Image: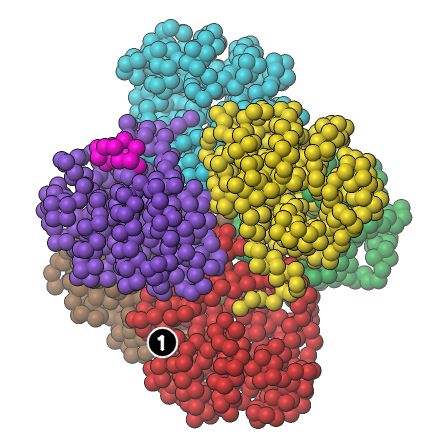
Chain colours: A brown, B green, C red, D cyan, E purple, F yellow
Amino acid sequence: MYDVVCFGEAMVRLMPPGFRRLEQTEELDVKVGGGELNVAVGVSRLGLKAAWVSRLPENPLGRMIRNKAREQGVSTEHLVWSKEGRAGLYFLEQGSAPRASAVLYDRAHSAISLMQPGEADWDACLKGAKWFHVSGITPALSASCAAVTLEALRKAKEHNCTVSYDLNYRGKLWTPEQAEQCQTPMMDLVDVLITTEDDADTVFHQQGEPGDIAKRLQQRFGFQAVAITLREIRTVWTGGWTSIVYADKLYTDRTYTLENVDRVGGGDSFSAGLIYGRLTQNSWEAGLKWGNAFSAIKHSIPGDLNWATREETEKLMQQEKFKIQR
Amino acid sequence: MYDVVCFGEAMVRLMPPGFRRLEQTEELDVKVGGGELNVAVGVSRLGLKAAWVSRLPENPLGRMIRNKAREQGVSTEHLVWSKEGRAGLYFLEQGSAPRASAVLYDRAHSAISLMQPGEADWDACLKGAKWFHVSGITPALSASCAAVTLEALRKAKEHNCTVSYDLNYRGKLWTPEQAEQCQTPMMDLVDVLITTEDDADTVFHQQGEPGDIAKRLQQRFGFQAVAITLREIRTVWTGGWTSIVYADKLYTDRTYTLENVDRVGGGDSFSAGLIYGRLTQNSWEAGLKWGNAFSAIKHSIPGDLNWATREETEKLMQQEKFKIQR
Amino acid sequence: MYDVVCFGEAMVRLMPPGFRRLEQTEELDVKVGGGELNVAVGVSRLGLKAAWVSRLPENPLGRMIRNKAREQGVSTEHLVWSKEGRAGLYFLEQGSAPRASAVLYDRAHSAISLMQPGEADWDACLKGAKWFHVSGITPALSASCAAVTLEALRKAKEHNCTVSYDLNYRGKLWTPEQAEQCQTPMMDLVDVLITTEDDADTVFHQQGEPGDIAKRLQQRFGFQAVAITLREIRTVWTGGWTSIVYADKLYTDRTYTLENVDRVGGGDSFSAGLIYGRLTQNSWEAGLKWGNAFSAIKHSIPGDLNWATREETEKLMQQEKFKIQR
Amino acid sequence: MYDVVCFGEAMVRLMPPGFRRLEQTEELDVKVGGGELNVAVGVSRLGLKAAWVSRLPENPLGRMIRNKAREQGVSTEHLVWSKEGRAGLYFLEQGSAPRASAVLYDRAHSAISLMQPGEADWDACLKGAKWFHVSGITPALSASCAAVTLEALRKAKEHNCTVSYDLNYRGKLWTPEQAEQCQTPMMDLVDVLITTEDDADTVFHQQGEPGDIAKRLQQRFGFQAVAITLREIRTVWTGGWTSIVYADKLYTDRTYTLENVDRVGGGDSFSAGLIYGRLTQNSWEAGLKWGNAFSAIKHSIPGDLNWATREETEKLMQQEKFKIQR
Amino acid sequence: MYDVVCFGEAMVRLMPPGFRRLEQTEELDVKVGGGELNVAVGVSRLGLKAAWVSRLPENPLGRMIRNKAREQGVSTEHLVWSKEGRAGLYFLEQGSAPRASAVLYDRAHSAISLMQPGEADWDACLKGAKWFHVSGITPALSASCAAVTLEALRKAKEHNCTVSYDLNYRGKLWTPEQAEQCQTPMMDLVDVLITTEDDADTVFHQQGEPGDIAKRLQQRFGFQAVAITLREIRTVWTGGWTSIVYADKLYTDRTYTLENVDRVGGGDSFSAGLIYGRLTQNSWEAGLKWGNAFSAIKHSIPGDLNWATREETEKLMQQEKFKIQR
Amino acid sequence: MYDVVCFGEAMVRLMPPGFRRLEQTEELDVKVGGGELNVAVGVSRLGLKAAWVSRLPENPLGRMIRNKAREQGVSTEHLVWSKEGRAGLYFLEQGSAPRASAVLYDRAHSAISLMQPGEADWDACLKGAKWFHVSGITPALSASCAAVTLEALRKAKEHNCTVSYDLNYRGKLWTPEQAEQCQTPMMDLVDVLITTEDDADTVFHQQGEPGDIAKRLQQRFGFQAVAITLREIRTVWTGGWTSIVYADKLYTDRTYTLENVDRVGGGDSFSAGLIYGRLTQNSWEAGLKWGNAFSAIKHSIPGDLNWATREETEKLMQQEKFKIQR
């Protein structure tokens, strides 16, 4: 019985070390990541029981992805294994001003993109679960993935899960029109929407102050809460992080100063903290604060996954100090 | 105007360092290789002018593959660039007894697999060329690649090239039946067949002594010459290398003792040496000796490509000594 | 409910890369290993459900050890966490003839060495379990660890587990006299003894042919079966591996030729294969064959843990071939 | 037939990783670079046909330098190969405030420093060329190199090339007096001077506002245009980059904010962009903008060479944003 | 005969590369460091003769620690070698905002913690020495270490050494009360106290302006001089460094801007510079300036040890410029 | 006062990792070595007091070389420091059959090659010394180095040192004729000649059985003893090592089986062991045995320097076993 169930693709992530361009590298750092897996790992690090549902090829790369989920205590019992399809890959270039970081996806034809409704045993994994999380990347992978997403959302509601949905628009996977058309009906099954200002505009044409965007989205779709993450880009290496939540009212939090070791997965760590805070303290304020602190610390850690502990996240929520601890 | 033109796929090759399993690695060594590119690089290292024809995606991985060809002096003027399709990848695990080395291909949907007849400007690159080389991997990539292979073979004959064909059966790409059916008609356009005993059996049902196999293949298809490489597998780290050529008569050569740093591309180096020796000395005996020595030294060099020089290959043909040179 | 439960220490393993001496290194490769964890991972790789019981400090190194067990699908639910004691470490130097590999232990004062009877919830983890495994390293860690070992063995018998015991004498932890005195009473609770000729001599004064040693040990202690691993040391890089089992009769198997990438954990992989074969095929002959093949392949894999799959182990049992698979 | 021909030394560049001091390092990162090669690579990356003329020793290091030029599409047909002289080396320490980066040259007695007039086939490589580029480093290498530089400049004018000259004063190679005496007569053959404020002062005693310096230099030597690069040093890791061009009038451009991964070769990238913009758009304004953008992006890329593409340089000229592209 | 003798523990320092968390790393960078060794190395780098007294285990790690001291010219003739006890270790995580760097000590049961008075030959190493340095870490290691510290301080005064004492409170080794009780009597033997504001408060309850703290400490204990280092923490990667000395009057110095490659050992470099300046120029002002400049440059160098030279330290004291030197 | 004084060049040694060719590498492993330094380090490791005399440039590479000598306890007090000349470099490629390892020297114009008689303070370093060692590389560096070698040999005899001379012919530095002409007069000052069969033939035209060669050399030059090392080359990775000494009679020893991690410096370790055994046990038999064992173990250690201990060398002399020590 899990606290949180997440569904989506995870990929093998290949990154040239030392700010090298992909074109010039003779070495790649290998990690594993993907929106929903990142969230599952995040809530597991914070102390919840999490399961991750996906579809993986039966080969060393598929097993590597599974292993990294297990390493973090995430249940992989409900994975679907496949003889067809490949493991999705993505190549990440770490940038420095004035060159932004860049991602080259090589995820077409992945095992999960070939997934069909009926393959996952949703009842088995959602039985007793408190929360279900998915992002807008999953339905973007293929038409059948969109169908499975819808299936999962319905099952989650049947099992009385709180459902969170990270809008996460990916322009390399579909167009804004496709994203809107596909996801609008899904929103009825969603309790908590997580998005950025940009994505809210791209998919649902919302602009303006973050609080207003959130409020309007809540009104339109009847969400319990809408969270908007607000990354402040200073340079490539430095930035600021905060978010807001609009539920019964608008909640705000401090802005964390970031030295970016690796910003990929920062939003997913926010989702994980939000879920953790909301679930364990039954408060959107707690959710927001856990989300922001957990996300801020993620930016200092290599890889998509957040290796922070609950203890240090809690400490960070009280103070922001950089003295060596010894 | 090139001495040698080669046509086929090259991939980004990803290898875990230090004998690690792919499943366990956190790092990948990045190189580039592919049968026909390896041959083009080989003849270029030995001093001939070579061009390599392929189809690459317009992205950093496509450029990386092109760069590595250029780095070795191979002309990439005649590459076809594509907005669709991906760069083929392969993952290589270096083994140690009793675990054999293993390759995981991730080459489906590559840019070259989508190539169509008419895309390459064969007249431009073959004009004045002396030799054309392709392997059985290229037609195995897709039906359209098989059609392009046939197109290229015909064009090569029109331009009076000597045509060599490395049978190179890949069981992960097609069945023996498909390989036979597709390649049998191509053999009429081939002057020099390069194969192993296993592949000769798998595709053309030839068994017995290497010299007999070669002779029978020559008779059946009317080849100028048939070369059979004879790898002696002792352990994973050690082995022996020799080959035979059957042309006007049977040519044999010494067996080289190998400590295998990297045996991938060993056969391609044989082809390169064979072409070089034949072209520059107009003798099958010279071709055989250059092929064997160049191949033997390849096994000591990391990567598919052969970084040996003509001078050290020539020296090796005289003596086999392991004293440090200083 | 687990198939196999293992109990013992796992350490962070620190190894200089590239055959460097520990004294000269500026880098250490970090892995995790320990006799019983290695066995738990082994049976999990082969497809059984395994749990590993130990005591770890609440710090990043303790978590790292736990993570590596989880990564391989081993349950860490029954670990005991401690605020006192450190994570055991060991430093490994890979040798080359005439310099043998060497281990420097830094495991004193570890969290597990401070473990007391009553701390582990044996009933919870052994309920329904089929097999319990421990080695002679665990009681050697401290007097209290010896007491916990005895406690565990009794509980395992109460729960009707088959109990295997790897004698694994460690001269840096105790004397032969201490080992004999402490372990003799434990042998009554053991069903399957696994040992080497050397250890059988050191602890129980048995000498002669392996089959005779095994038979005499069986007779003296009433074991179901005795397995003796027979490592043939050729050089540091190369060797041979086989084993025998004496149960109702003497079972022997082929000898595998090894190129040693990493021989640490080779014996533990034998134990894992033995348990797997015996449990799933109810045959000592199967156990022996799985043990030898799984162990042989381990020697080709960096780290204590065996990243082989059941499929490739099975394939190896049929043939010994080193051709690249592609 | 080339668009741009460059002449000068390239060296093997050896850099300790991770901000280590040279004195403390056990590892060196190997790259290749040198002012004029960097320019040739830059214009090749941007799409022009470039050749690089130099003199290299016939050994692996000489070949490595050649290979890196070829890898980027630069023609190495006109290199002079030598049995005497060594490959120049330089050691680079990456700094951090308050420690500046530092270079230790080990370039004395290099193959190019022994080059004599008459060795290079200038007519062959300059035939049809549009632009010739050299820097003040080349004549500083030796008296014979100064003579070859003069020879090259004259040949370039004969072939109606536009000639650019990067003043690039190197205090470790000669004195200000030597630099002035040697280079003053060369200036008559130069169309475009590229310099910094410091070098303009050191060699030609010009001080004041950059625009004034440029104007005075233009007037004194009759240049078509003078470009002055204006690096703003904030810390070692961060800075700003802009330049001005004085031709028919003063051209200025925006200042780019830099996070310095590797500032070596930044000036050479400016020269490359300037040449590219001027040649392809026949406008000093375009030259300045391409120079600044291409140089700014260079600072984010490890090594002397600029692995940016024309497309991303063009994009940068429009916007400065650090969002991950995905 | 030494200029400076230092006494204390040095450890093997293990750091994950690339900002990785300790829990996630598969590699550790190995260095050696410890407060008093760092000071001995510092003064040796600056040109003084230094000896370091400690107690090390007879194993590769003990020898590694000794070697690193010798590498820097520090005499290790007076080390005490031991068959018992281990080499102390510490694990260092490099942070980035908002995650501070962190140290995990694994130094309990080290060889030095078991040291007894009478083991070191103080007369031999202090004969003719001008300065003795120890820090508050040494007595914190164990009761017997506190006794040896007192022994050493007395011997140093007998030999007419100037005695400096870096208060260096380590909360993981003892409580403030223990620190005060143990060290108060030692202060009578101390001539120069070096501390931070925090430590002065924790151990001796001094608060307020640095100058006032220093003055009050001087008055209470009769020190010749009190130095207070003033690290300005901006982010984890950036900061400022200055210090003050109170002797006959208050001395202040400029603040250096830091880009922190590695701030560990920064305080020890200050001590080394202070000792060097005071000893060679007989002036507290010189001591302060050398201390600050030498410390500032340390922050740019990986490892505890300061690989700067006297020449570059001197240069830095005049100017703060980040231009590449070439 | 030293037991052993050595004189000669040491270089920075740069090696591509993982069997890469120099031409293809992007990384170099940095070590330090040189015949006579290797010997000084060897005798220091074994417990003697050693000094190394050389001439080094005042730059980071010169300091690096000095540091590595100090790290091993070798005195560098008598080094001559120079503002002219460079640090010698050599590039080492590790081979594998059929490609031999190869060295590319870049040592011309080094600081030591410019050394003149009178620069070193021979009286200071040889006072009380028991043994002086030099090799045939030193006089080959330059005419002035040959003069300094002669000066040193004379001084060593004045100070009653036993003088050993390793013939060490280097064909890249001089011709056989030059070597014979220069070294013949030096032989009068030599007590112990160390050579290989090849070098004895090249320089002094001796052929035949090793024992006969040694005897004839002894008779011709009146040596106390002649040692001939007998490397048995099997493959590049494997070999055998033994030596003979001819003094009052012929001494022989067992042959060690080698797995070559790094054979460079193997002969120097023999010299070190020979000196150690002879000096401490006053016996040529002991010298031979220490020489062979110390040399054999060297082949298993990366770098020129021998990181073995006296204890493990002694152990090896008794047994040859490859079991892991734990």
Amino acid type, mark 1: Leu
As displayed, is residue B185 above or below residue E310? below
Magenta span has C92?
A: no
Q: Residue at x 36, y 33 (%)?
A: E310
Along the viewing direction, whichever of E299 and B63 lies nearer the viewer: E299
Q: Residues within 10 Å of mark 1 (few under 14, many from 20)?
A: some
Label the magenta part by its dominant secondary structure. Answer: helix
As displayed, is residue D246 above or below residue E274? above
Along the viewing direction, whichever of C318 and E37 lies nearer the viewer: E37
x, y percentage for residue F236? 69, 50
Q: Is residue A248 left or right of residue D239?
A: left
Of the 4 image quadrants, the one containing the N terminus of chain A is bottom left
Q: Which residue is mark 1?
A: C114
Which quarter of the picture shows residue F200? top right
- The magenta segment: E276-288
Mark 1 element type: helix
Along the viewing direction, whichever of D128 and C246 lies nearer the viewer: C246
Which quarter of the picture shows residue B16? bottom right
Q: Residue at x 37, y 47 (%)?
A: E125
